[in-house]
Amino acid sequence: MTRPPVKRVAVIGAGPAGAIAVDALAQEKTFDIIRVFERREEAGGCWIGDKTKPQPLSNFASLANRTADQPLPIPNILPAQAPKPDAPRFSESSVYPYLETNVDFSPMQFSQEPIPADKTKKSIALHGPNTPFRHWTVMQRYIQSLINRNGYEDLVSYNTTVERVEKVGDEWKVVLRKEGKEKDYWSVEYFDAVVVASGHYWVPYIPSVEGLEEFEKGRPGSVIHSKHFRGRDHFKGKRVVVVGASVSAADIAYDLAHSKTAQLPVHTITIGHAANGYFGDGAFHHPSIQQHPSIKSVCPKTRTVHLVNGTSIPAVDTIIFGTGYSWTLPFLPQVEIRNNRVPELYQHVVYQRDPTLLFVGAVGAGLTFKIFEWQAVLAARVLAGRADLPTEQEMKEWEENRVKVKGDGVKFTMVFPDFEEYFEEVRRIAGEPVDGKGRRLPKFKREWVRSFLDGHELRKDMWRRLNEQAKKELEKEQRVFKAKL
């Protein structure tokens, strides 16, 4: 079947994936309209710094069963004005004042746009003058610079949420909600194609724990997700339990323990849970961190956290969950989400049922910005009619074969360790620019992976070094205390 040419393209999101998608589309020089819709007030995605306090968590059952962030009811007649929605939309970021990247900047940056070499005194002190880590403000400015060039800023509508995307005939009907001071303004626009670049680290996943919601209701703000962590100073003298064995839980628990801000020890729920494959569990071996097995229940009255091994942690002030996120697409209810991934995406990009719906960023951690670039170029080439896509049956077979190897879950989205194979296959399918049209993808460089992994080793070395320092300080304090007795 011959498809009509694509001339109007909508991009959802102005984070790193959306920013590079705009450039890839523009460089194809074939589209009449490129429109970008960003629900936040500026570009940056999860690197935007929030200026307001996060709202307390609610409806814990939906967070546990991954049904939060449901579609909003749409006015019967558009355009329309309507009251602001009451339901949380989870658009706040996970940035806190002193957050820095935990990955070397070089494998993060796009192939043609270098990340600025700005380094903080803190990072230099921890990792030396050649520290490869960057403050979150550097990353936000970097993403904004990609949008604020070549006139791309004129393509973006900020404070505008895409609430529904549906195919009507040969067109995509895109329903929009723009935030106003008193009411929101709903409208509709039509496109030939849609690129989803909205990310999937927005809706917190919090496992079901008996008594947890009552604990939070009794003391609002006593249960938070790592995305709501706004720095150690909010936890001075508090008894804190951090749940999770991966990188966000590690960073927070270590921060609270090593700074001696929270009441010591900081309690972590890590025993029996797999550590992050990149960063390991070194952070949790700080002498002021006490590790525990899973939570069985929480008593709201006594603020006691009961554990599965029969022990308990009394008088808990705050429980912080670093337990990951749920992938949601409230604006695409017709697209299935299964096992926290989006199935039917060929090469994690092309929606097999309709190649005019594409995704940039539908992958797990590892060389993410660069993967976004390759995916964005592939998406742009597909829409321009220049990519060498296989048949729908062959795309289905690609997914079936990958499920056999990776499984039908989150591991399906992990490109690691097959970075080179993936980058080169996407580059082959996308093809080269023709007659000066299109963004050129360079050949894969293994040094990107080396830098990526070396950055992790720097972080692990930092934890080992500081853990040993903290252990010696603690032993000295204990000797002084005993001498006074």
Image (spheres, grey):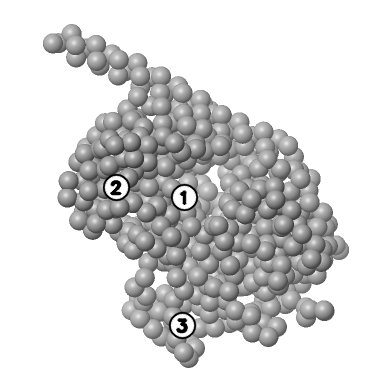
* Residue 406: assigned label: none
Left or right? Give the position of 45 relative to 170: left
**SS of the residue under disc 2:** strand
The spot of residue 130 in percent (x, y) is 56, 29
Res 326 visible? yes
- Which sits earlier in the primary sequence, circle 3 or circle 2? 3
Residue at 21% x, 54% y is: 219
Q: How busy is the neighbourhood of tag 3: few (under 14 within 10 Å), some, or many (20 plus)?
A: some
Q: Which residue is mark 3?
A: 74
**SS of the residue under disc 1:** loop
Quarter of the image where the C terminus is located:
top left
Q: Residue furthest right?
A: 435
**SS of the residue under disc 3:** loop
Amino acid type shown at disc 3: Ile
Considering only vertical position in the picture, is 44 above or below 382?
A: above
Amino acid type shown at disc 1: Gly
Amino acid type shown at disc 2: Ser
Q: Residue furthest bottom?
A: 77
Q: How busy is the neighbourhood of tag 2: few (under 14 within 10 Å), some, or many (20 plus)?
A: some
- Which sits earlier in the primary sequence, circle 3 or circle 1? 3
Residue at 34% x, 40% y is: 308
Quarter of the image where the N terminus is located:
bottom right
Res 259 visible? no
* Residue 324: assigned label: 1
Considering only vertical position in the picture, is 386 above or below 449?
A: below
The spot of residue 55 in percent (x, y) is 31, 60
Mark 3 → mark 1, Cα distance in angstroms: 30 Å
- Which sits earlier in the primary sequence, circle 1 or circle 2? 2
Q: Which residue is mark 2?
A: 297
Left or right? Give the position of 14 relative to 273: right
In front of the other: label 3 or label 2?
A: 2
Residue at 61% x, 31% y is: 454
